[in-house]
Image (cartoon, grey):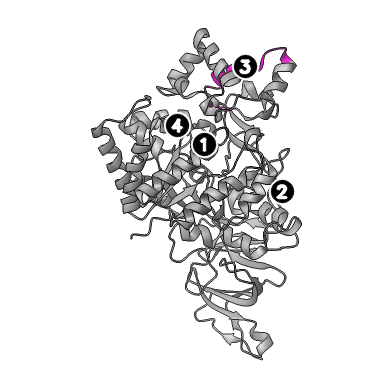
Amino acid sequence: MDPVDVTDRADLVLRDAEVVDGTGAPSYRADVAVEDGRIVSIVQEAWAAGCQRPRARREIDAEGLVLAPGFIDMHAHSDLALLRDPDHSAKAAQGVTLEVIGQDGLSYAPVDERTLAEVRRAIAGWNGPGDDLDLSWRSVGEYLDRLDHGFDGRGIAVNAAYLIPQGTVRALAVGWDDRPATPAELDRMRRLVAEGLEQGAVGLSSGLTYTPGMYADGAELTELCRVVASYGGYYCPHHRSYGAGALEAYEEMVALTREAGCPLHLAHATMNFGVNRDRAPELLALLDKALAAGADITLDTYPYTPGCTTLAALLPSWASEGGPEAVLGRLADEESAERIRHHLEVTGSDGCHGVPVEWETIEISGVGDPALAGYVGRTVLQAARERGETPWTVARRLLTGDRLGTTILQHVGHEENVRTIMRHPTHTGGSDGILQGSKPHPRAYGTFPRYLGTYVRELGVLSLEECVAHLTGRPAARLRLPDRGLVREGYRADLVLFDPATVAPGATFEDPRRLPTGIPHVLIDGRFVIEDGRRTDVLAGRAVRRTPV
């Protein structure tokens, strides 16, 4: 049996791979040929039928490896990391070939000089202060162009799609005050959203437990979602509560997007805190009812129980009104600080999802001020006991001393809820990975191999084919990408080869930056960004812009 000579048109053949194509269909063995960044030939089990096999200028022996589409991280916080770190192995080594950024209603475009400074301060815990970068863009289009240019015009480590951040839009048009938008301000927000979509954004995000996005009422959000729908985008809210009132918060998002006729993608959709133990089936029943009525809904989750955010995010919304400097002023005032403590510890802050804070669940994961490094890895309660202080005294010191830049792990999730939600047919994978801090959440480095190693191979929660569909084909469909997310002829060669018997996250809570095992090759546009388990110097990533309707 002679091989087919395709050396005049194929760059690469991945031979004898077990193809899991991203549709959920059963796997099959095949040779896959790649040319000019696209899949040009898939020859299934030609050797068994005595058929000719493709060959090319280079071959990779994929015997024993699964070939899948590159993974799509539907919820990423790499907005500045993509411009800061050309290596970006945190995602590339996991097999991620596309990240969706601009999440939780706060990011860096569209802005003016004032709002850029305010946003940088507000989310320094997510992305760092940005002092090391040229932040000269102002519009969504300029930010996407900056991603395209990347490092010396060569691009970025992985592809990125962008959601317009509703909180940033509100800061630009209204400010950081807790009040309704005027008709003129609402018109400006509509224009800003439309402009961002025209410039390539794929949708709109919100952070409805973060200021100033949380100050928007349902009517305001509905009007912005109407604009999103008219451009074929989707709405991705971090809704108003993941604790007390979580189901009501989900219901609000379903209702307002139905009224607006806008597709809905629920960010890091889970049911947390003690009040929601074993209640994931209630959430899924709500979504199934809406889907049966014709709603267009998807969601993403990460395969871990703890969450991750900033310590400042737990504060009540009234304390955050006016922006970061106003928050620091209230924390410095004894009377206001005591009122904040009462809301946090007694009545339940809306920033803490309506649940009184349990300081033993709040672990410090990162600080901006090196003088506070001794707090990292301890819960607020542990640190308080070590110092003979109250937990609020410790939390207040961190908030003021670190100028709101402290990040935390919040140990409030439930494994049974995590597993139940990931089985749902609308589920996709998102890391929610915050890369800042000396002890970040391991989901930033381990989400996708953890799905494959822990929840497929070890626990059998999902089949391999179904899990890969959750991480590839399904998110590509939500993003309306016409040529990504599947192993299919004509599609872009964004591909990952992994060993299903050994793939596993290296990252742990104790050592959160360890890279995964069992993922030897990752390609973007047919170029190796991971080869033989090592990061190459290839920068094949670009901004992935919205497909026009």
Is the Cβ of the residue at disc 3 closer than 8 Å to that at disc 4?
Answer: no
- Mark 1 vs 2, N-terminal side: 1
Residue 277 place in picture, x, y as percent = 66, 39
Find residue 392 and name its label: 3
Disc 3 crowd rating (10 Å Cα; few below 14, some 14-19, many 20+) is many
Residue 15 place in picture, x, y as percent = 65, 76
Find residue 127 and name its label: 1
Nearer the camera: disc 3 or disc 4: 3
The residue that label 4 is drawn on is 120
Viewer-side residue, 302 vs 509 = 302
- Mark 3 vs 1, N-terminal side: 1
Q: For the magenta stretch, what is the residue range?
A: 387-406
Q: In the image, 372: left or right of 11?
A: right
Residue 241 place in picture, x, y as percent = 52, 35
Nearer the camera: disc 3 or disc 1: 3
Q: In the image, 512: left or right of 55?
A: right
* Residue 361 in the image: above or below residue 462: above
Q: CA distance from mark 4 to mark 1?
A: 8 Å
The residue that label 2 is drawn on is 506
* Quadrant showing the C terminus: bottom left
Q: Amino acid type of disc 1?
A: Asn
The residue that appears at 67% across and 29% down in the rendered structure is 361
Q: CA distance from mark 4 to mark 2?
A: 31 Å
Nearer the camera: disc 3 or disc 2: 3
Judge whether residue 354 can be spotted in this image.
Answer: yes
* Residue 125 in the image: above or below residue 372: below
Q: In the image, 157: left or right of 15?
A: left
- Which residue occupies the extreme top position in the image? 334
